[in-house]
């Protein structure tokens, strides 16, 4: 907590010195406006490219957890996934494999490798991994901010099983929000269901890519950014 407070204070100090603060998350925008009075904050979406063609349901198998492991919540999530969530999945479907991938992976995560759990470390092409699996999972129990791993998964046509922490700031519509669970039991049940139900998987695939096109397309990012900066310029002119 002391380190977290130190980082927060440093970020707020920088915000006070800027003309405009941009954030990807409406949740963070609310916090900034509350804690740093007078700061001009605008929400600009995280740009993500949608995959036009994706492998068929039959050609995919397994679950992927992707993250940068210099970030403590990802370490906790990987441990929770392998020690509590996947064992519940395997009680129903012992053939569903789990892959853990990402940069800066510590030894405690590498040691999670076991039958049914593949630990691959950093990868140069996340798209190749996403093409192999039927779904991804983001079992984050703490942390904040928009989760790029979730957006990338949805953009690749891969449904994502998530916790409420992993959805922060994304305002996911149904049916995407329906893949949210708080307990190991709920996440395991969602994992089995999405892995085996082709119709539900297709529904989530289409909804995910539609959501990314609507909210995170580069054209949307450019328009939102231009509007934010344009509003600031108009305010400066009016005040001069």
Image (tube, rainbow, N blue to C red):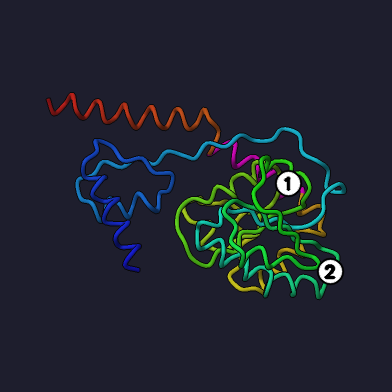
Where is residue 77 shown, x and y percent of the image?
A: 59, 65
Tell me which corner region of the image, top left, top right, bottom left or bottom right, holds residue 190.
bottom right
Can you say which quadrant of the picture contains the N terminus?
A: bottom left
Q: Residue visible at 56% across and 57% down?
A: 69
Which residue sits furthest left?
240
Quick one: label 2 or label 1, which is nearer the N terminus?
2
Dominant SS in magenta: helix
Q: Position of residue 220 (x, y in %)?
A: 50, 31
Rendered position, 51 above or below 86: above
Q: How many marks?
A: 2
Tell whether 217 sits left or right of 144.
right
Tell me if residue 162 can be seen. Answer: yes
Helix or strand or loop: what does disc 1 sit on?
A: helix
Position of residue 235 measured from the top left corner of the image (x, y, whole percent): 21, 30
Left-right relation of 218 to 238 = right
Residue 98, image x, y percentages: 75, 61
The residue to which callout 1 is attached is: 129
Residue 178 at least partly seen = no
- Front in this rendered view, residue 70 or 235: 70
Q: Is residue 94 magenta?
A: no
Q: Residues within 10 Å of mark 1 (few under 14, many from 20)?
A: some
Q: Residue at 64% x, 41% y: name it.
A: 155
Mark pair 2, 1: CA separation: 21 Å
Quadrant (top left, top right, bottom left, bottom right) of the C terminus: top left
Q: Residues within 10 Å of mark 2 (few under 14, many from 20)?
A: some
Magenta highlight range: 202-215
For residue 159, above or below residue 239: below
Left/right placement of residue 4 relative to residue 159 reads left
Which element carries disc 2, helix, strand or loop?
loop
Residue identified by numbered label 2: 93
């Amino acid at each position: 907590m002391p380190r977290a407070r130190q980082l927060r204070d440093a970020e707020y100090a920088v915000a006070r010195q800027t003309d405009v603060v941009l954030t990807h998350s409406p949740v963070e925008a609310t916090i900034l406006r509350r804690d740093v009075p007078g700061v001009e904050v605008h929400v600009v979406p995280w740009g993500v490219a949608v995959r036009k063609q994706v492998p068929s349901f039959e050609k995919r198998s397994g679950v992927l957890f992707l993250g940068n492991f210099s970030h403590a919540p990802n370490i906790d999530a990987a441990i929770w996934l392998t020690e509590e969530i996947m064992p519940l999945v395997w009680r129903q479907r012992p053939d569903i494999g789990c892959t853990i991938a990402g940069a800066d992976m510590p030894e405690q995560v590498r040691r999670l490798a076991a039958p049914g759990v593949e630990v691959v470390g950093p990868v140069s092409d996340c798209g190749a991994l996403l093409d192999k699996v039927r779904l991804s999972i983001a079992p984050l129990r703490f942390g904040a901010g928009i989760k790029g791993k979730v957006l990338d998964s949805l953009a690749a046509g891969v449904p994502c099983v998530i916790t409420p922490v992993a959805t922060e700031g994304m305002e996911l519509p149904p049916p995407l929000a329906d893949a949210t669970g708080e307990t190991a039991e709920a996440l395991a049940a969602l994992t089995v269901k999405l892995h085996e139900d082709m119709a539900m998987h297709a529904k989530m695939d289409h909804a995910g890519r539609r959501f990314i096109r609507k909210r995170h397309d580069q054209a949307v990012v450019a328009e939102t950014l231009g509007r934010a900066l344009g509003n600031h310029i108009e305010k400066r002119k009016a005040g001069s």
